[in-house]
Amino acid sequence: MEQLLKITTVPISIEFKVNNARLEQRRGTVDLEVSRDEGNFRIKSRPIRLNMDTFQARDSVRPASAKSMLDSFAQKGKNAAYQATATYAQEGQILLSATLGDDALDQIIKQRNTINTDYGLDFLPKTDANLDWIEPDITIQYEMDKLNFDWKINKAGFEFIPGSIEFSVTQRPDVLIEYVGDPLYVPPSANPNYTPAVDIKA
């Protein structure tokens, strides 16, 4: 009898990949940051300054302070007292030296009514103004730009990478069934090689 089926078995295929453990060294990196500080330029000028003190000069023309007024009144009082003392002394001398027939009182009255023609000549103001001055000054300040460098260094190190085993299935197991016989025709007479059966009679 002819074999009609062909059975083929396909085995599984597995691939192994082994990665050995290793020690890797990492390289150090360096980062540089540069920043800039802008400079400046400044000029400071101070002009000449004149201080003028005219208090004493104005006070000599027209005393305005309370102290000056008190001093003036005190001086006038002293002068009046001196003048009255001299007048009384002079009139007393006239009365002491008077004789019979002299009109001493008339002489004293005439002397009191005499107009004083004495006058004084003075220049005002009596003092000069006080002048004080400060010399001019100029200051120049210049500052150049600055560059700042910031280094950031990452240190080198070692990294351990453990080993590994990789499994890879390259072919799965399978069973192939193949029909190898002649084709089956239904009805059988459809087969081009059909031969009718011979009926043998006894």
Image (cartoon, rainbow, N blue to C red):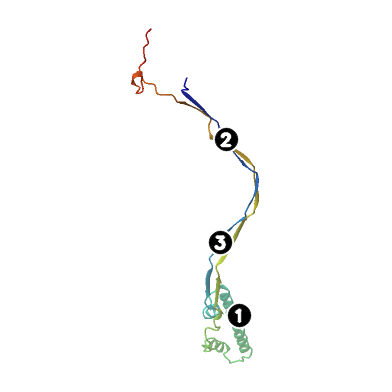
Residue linked to disc 3: 34
Give the CA distance from mark 3 to mark 2. 57 Å
Give the residue displayed 61% in from the left and 88% down from the top: 90
Residue type beneath disc 1: Lys
Give the residue displayed 57% in from the left and 35% down from the top: 14
Expressed as whole percent of the image width and height from the top left, the position of residue 145 reads: 55, 68
Residue type beneath disc 3: Val
At label 3, counting other C-alpha atoms closer than 10 Å, the crowd grade (few under 14, some 14-19, many 20 or more) is few
Q: In the rendered image, which quarter is residue 76 located in?
A: bottom right
Expressed as whole percent of the image width and height from the top left, the position of residue 88 reads: 61, 84
Residue type beneath disc 2: Ile
Q: Are marks 3 and 2 in contact (CB under 8 Å)?
A: no
Instruction: Looking at the picture, tell me which residue is in the foreground, 157 or 186.
Output: 186
| For residue 163, above or below residue 174 | below
Label number found at residue 163: none
Expressed as whole percent of the image width and height from the top left, the position of residue 87 reads: 59, 85
Q: In the rendered image, which quarter is residue 128 located in?
A: bottom right
Q: Is residue 167 left or right of residue 192?
A: right
Give the CA distance from mark 3 to mark 1. 88 Å
User: In the current view of this chain or complex, which residue is farthest to the top?
Assistant: 202
| For residue 42, above or below residue 109 | above
Instruction: Looking at the picture, tell me which residue is in the foreground, 171 or 184.
Output: 184
Residue linked to disc 2: 14
Closer to viewer: mark 3 or mark 2: 2
| For residue 91, above or below residue 54 | below
Residue linked to disc 1: 78
Earlier-in-chain disc, 3 versus 1: 3
